[in-house]
Image: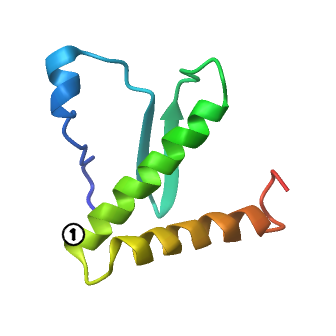
Amino acid sequence: MSDTFEELDIPPDALEQGGIEIVRASIVDGAVSVALRRAFDDPATWGRLLLDLARQAARAYAAEMEISEDEAFDRIRAGWEAEGLDPANPLN
């Protein structure tokens, strides 16, 4: 890990057209640190956003590693399901 913060670039379309950042996630000392704004009237929209993020992450794994997009997505889904079933998860 680095002692400096390594941020992503702003997406080109957001630079061009403007927008509102709704989520920022970082790894700090091995844990996820998140800042977000509610952003949507219907919480179901977050479900669609999270699914889109999972698909984009799967594409990134497929592009950068020896794994197919489908296999990467299945591993992401397995992690989601394992976290949801974890008795230590405060939402259970």
Establish if 46 lies above or below 90: above
Residue pictured at 51% horizontal, 53% vertical: 32
Establish if 30 lies above or below 44: below
Q: Tell me which amino acid carries mark 1.
A: Ala
Considering every residue shown, the one lying at the far front of the view is 70
Residue pictured at 43% horizontal, 49% vertical: 53
* Pointer 1 residue: 63
**Place of residue 18 in the rendered image (x, y in percent of width and height, measured from the top left):** 24, 15
**Place of residue 67 in the rendered image (x, y in percent of width and height, measured from the top left):** 32, 81
Residue pictured at 81% horizontal, 53% vertical: 90
74 sits left or right of 11 in the view: right
91 sits left or right of 24 in the view: right
Q: Which quadrant of the rendered structure holds the C terminus?
A: bottom right
Establish if 89 lies above or below 25: below
**Place of residue 23 in the rendered image (x, y in percent of width and height, measured from the top left):** 45, 34
> Residue 13 lies in what quarter of the image?
top left
> Residue 56 lies in what quarter of the image?
bottom left
Q: Secondary structure at mark 1?
A: helix
Residue pictured at 58% horizontal, 31% vertical: 45
**Place of residue 48 in the rendered image (x, y in percent of width and height, measured from the top left):** 54, 40
Instruction: Identify the coloring.
Output: rainbow
Q: Residues within 10 Å of mark 1 (few under 14, many from 20)?
A: few
- In this orientation, which residue lies closer to the viewer: 73 or 79? 73
